[in-house]
Amino acid sequence: MLNFGIKIKDGREILGQIPRLLIGGVKSFVGNIPVGNTGGANVLPLQPMEIPEDLKEIMRPYRTI
């Protein structure tokens, strides 16, 4: 998302990604990541989000749990 913010020249997205990278990187390392979170600066970093049914169906063969 940081790269996306740079490509579209969105300062808010770029600045919003910095704390996400710092906090999210640590949380990902310990296995605590929010399911379905889009990763945009307009979403809280640890907020889980509902995954749409059509995407769940696509991901079903790759489910590891």
Image: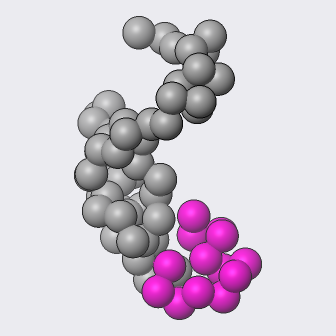
Please tell me which residue is depicted at 42% across the width and 62% down the height of the picture. 21
23 vs 6: above or below: above
Question: Which of the pair 57/59 is nearer the observer?
Answer: 57
The C terminus, quarter of image = top left
Give the quadrant of residue 9.
bottom right
Please tell me which residue is depicted at 35% across the width and 64% down the height of the picture. 43
Please tell me which residue is depicted at 73% across the width and 78% down the height of the picture. 7
| Residue 41 lies in the magenta stretch | no
Residue lying at the far right of the rendered structure: 7
Give the quadrant of residue 55.
top right
* Residue 13 image point, x, y percent: 50, 79
Report whether residue 28 is seen. no
Q: Find the magenta span and give its range.
A: 1-13
* Residue 5 image point, x, y percent: 61, 77
| Residue 11 lies in the magenta stretch | yes
The N terminus, quarter of image = bottom right
Q: Which colouring convention does the figure follow?
A: one colour
Please tell me which residue is depicted at 47% across the width and 86% down the height of the picture. 12
On the rendered structure, is 53 left or right of 65? right
* Residue 19 image point, x, y percent: 34, 70
Task: Decide whether the magenta segment is chiefly helix, strand or loop.
Answer: helix
Give the quadrant of residue 57.
top right
On the rendered structure, is 13 left or right of 27? right
Q: How many marks?
A: 0
